[in-house]
Image (cartoon, rainbow, N blue to C red):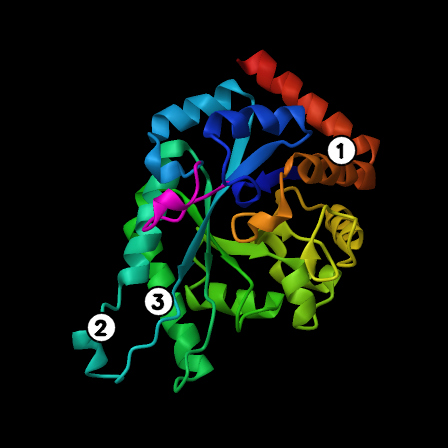
Amino acid sequence: MKFAFGTVACPHWTHERVASFVRESGYDGVELRTFLDTPERIVCEPALTGGRKLREMFADAGAAVSSLATSVSFDEAILPPVIGRAVIDTEKSVRACQRAVTLADDIGIPTVRVFGFAVPKFDNRTRTVRRIGQRARLAVDRADKRGVRIAFENGGDFQTASDVAELIQATGTHPLVGACYAPAVGAGGGDDVAAAIDTLGSKLWMVRLTDSKNNTPCALGDGDAGVEESVRALAESGFNGWVVFDWPRVWMPELGEPEDVLRRSAERLHEWLGASHSASRENDATREAVSA
């Protein structure tokens, strides 16, 4: 598996600083966060920089970009059920997802992270799941030529691996639709990590890790979220996708500077997986150097 950190941890950094920090801190890549409609929220907003420039910048630094994180969700209700289709913008989320897909493609990012999120008040789960699936499918169909994948993350009223699998099924199990699983969120819904990994199977493309102590986000392994057990379960399953460490300083500036937390989290990840992962990273780096 490959390790990345999300730029929600360092919203005040430039892209240049992000790119240089990736390799020197022990990560394989980075997840870029975009706010699309309010791009001025963070300095390292990919929507404000040319895609080709970012692609070259991260490639030159030897840092992969694992994914593009968004707030896109497809859950907005259509109320009243019939008339609402005429007065409500029913495809706003579809267009937002398409913008994110275009941005990801320009930069060379393989996956866009989205949400199903919630069952609106006065609606029901069956209609909501169907609507989320239809909108996600529409977004994928219109962007299919770009080949960028969409990963549903568990959250809101869709906390568990089974919930995410249900959303994927609602798209017709489209080959470009998969899952990003957050074990801490799944635990809140009663998930067992090993069982969740098995439930999502080949559709599990990404895992988002967080840890906290006394309800405050912290470095991986410093809290009580059972992160080490999650990483070991992933390793035992043969998972070879991206594991993204999420430390939400963008919403909690009181957390302070991120360097130490990011470095310690990378060290823990390598420590938990041992020498085999370090050797794998060295082999990957050698292959990249030879191919270059």
Q: Position of residue 37 (x, y in %)?
A: 32, 51
Residue at 39% over, 74% down? 130
Residue 248 can be seen in this image? no
Residue at 72% over, 61% down? 193
- Is 35 part of what is drawn in magenta? yes
Amino acid type of the residue tagged 2 in the rendering: Ile
Horizontal side of 9 relative to 273 (left or right) equals left
Q: Which residue is mark 2?
A: 88
Amino acid type of the residue tagged 3 in the rendering: Gln
Horizontal side of 61 relative to 262 (left or right) equals left
Tell me where the magenta segment starts and ends, as one range. Answer: 32-43
> Which sits earlier in the primary sequence, circle 2 or circle 3?
2
Q: Which residue is mark 3?
A: 134
- The answer to whether residue 281 is above or below residue 60 is below
Amino acid type of the residue tagged 1 in the rendering: His
Disc 1/disc 2 C-alpha distance (Å): 50 Å
Q: Which residue is mark 1?
A: 277
> Which sits earlier in the primary sequence, circle 1 or circle 3?
3
Disc 1/disc 3 C-alpha distance (Å): 39 Å
